[in-house]
Image: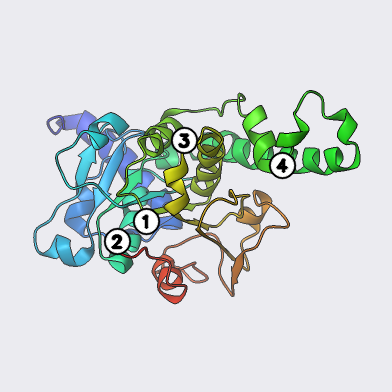
Amino acid sequence: MPDRPDGMKHHLLTYLKNRNAFADALFYDITALTEKERAKLNPLIEFEGSIVVVPPAQHAAAGQTIRHYESAAAFLNSDDHPARAIVLAGVGSSVLGAAALARNVANVCGMDVAAVVTGYGMLDIMDEALGGCYFYGAADQTLMELEKFLKQFPQMAWGIKLAQSSTFGMWSQLSDIRPPKLRDSQTLLTILSAQTADLRLLLGHSKGSLMIRFALAQLFQSGHACLQNLTVVTLGAVVDLPDQLSMKRQIIGALDWFGGMNSRMGVAYTLVPNAWHHTNTQIPYHLSVESVLQELALCPHP
């Protein structure tokens, strides 16, 4: 990590970092991280597609620190014990929001959790809202309408093999379309493609849920059978997950109109009363990640 800048440059970077923290605090439980941990997370250095591995608060209190990786390759080749869970945050999150989400999961599951950084907070929140998030959501909705049409007129499948005319098969056929940004998506695909036997939990919030759906659609079509053992959890967006998954749960707040805009209809999900899109427990009408995982017993077995 570079030396701390001096003078005007330092003040400018501090302002940008604080502005990003405001966006993360709107959606994520950043108080789950200590002040010292938050100070070491810099969205201006830890870019989209990088990875942080966050220990449970109890382990952090005993001296364990957050580990940082610039890429999927660095993460996979690390000598450290591999994380058994991966989380992806959504719109408005930087490395701070990603780490906060990972800490929530780590606290409940009692193990280190890796977080793929999916954005830069306020630095790109509008770009993500109008591009990255809605790419995945709009693509899923388009495929849903196409599926309905093909069921009525299968003879007009336009070259899509009828044997692959399920929603998942159609996604694979149309997944040559690429989202506005690929760094975070490619990091997730690289890790999942490695077929690590240690990986047991994959959790996404908001755009992170849509990215998980996008990645799994491609990987299952490529025959990555070991992913069948994954527990997959989505928060704040309901998506069409593959039938091959042995354990999957989708949770959305009853007040979450934002997540609802990017959700798939006709898919089983759990509705949390009096909850909106954010997971910051300091703000009313939050969706508590820790409570959801505890109540639904969604942590994988050791």
Type of amino acid under label 1: Leu
- Which is nearer the N-term, disc 4 or disc 2? 2
Q: Residue at x 27, y 44 (%)?
A: 52
Q: Position of residue 184 (x, y in %)?
A: 42, 34
Q: Which residue is mark 2?
A: 106
- Which is nearer the N-term, disc 2 or disc 3? 2
The front one of 54 and 174 is: 174
Q: Position of residue 94 (x, y in %)?
A: 37, 43
Q: Residue at x 36, y 42 (%)?
A: 116
Q: Residues within 10 Å of mark 4 (few under 14, many from 20)?
A: some
Q: Disc 4 vs disc 3: which is toward the camera?
A: 4
Tell me the quarter of the image containing the C terminus. bottom left
Q: Residue at x 42, y 45 (%)?
A: 226
Type of amino acid under label 2: Ala
Snapshot quadrant of residue 123 = top left
Q: Secondary structure at mark 3?
A: loop
Type of amino acid under label 4: Ser
Q: Secondary structure at mark 2?
A: helix
Snapshot quadrant of residue 217 = top right
- Which is nearer the N-term, disc 3 or disc 1? 1
Q: Disc 2 vs disc 3: which is toward the camera?
A: 2
Q: Is residue 117 found left or right of 238 in the rendered image?
A: left
The answer to whether residue 281 shows anywhere in this view is yes
Q: Which residue is mark 3?
A: 124
Tag 1 and tag 2, C-beta contact below 8 Å: no
Q: Which residue is mark 4?
A: 166
Q: Position of residue 246 (x, y in %)?
A: 50, 57
Separation of marks 4 and 2 at Cα, in angstroms: 35 Å
Q: Which residue is mark 1?
A: 101
The answer to whether residue 96 shows anywhere in this view is no
Q: Disc 4 vs disc 1: which is toward the camera?
A: 4
Type of amino acid under label 3: Asp
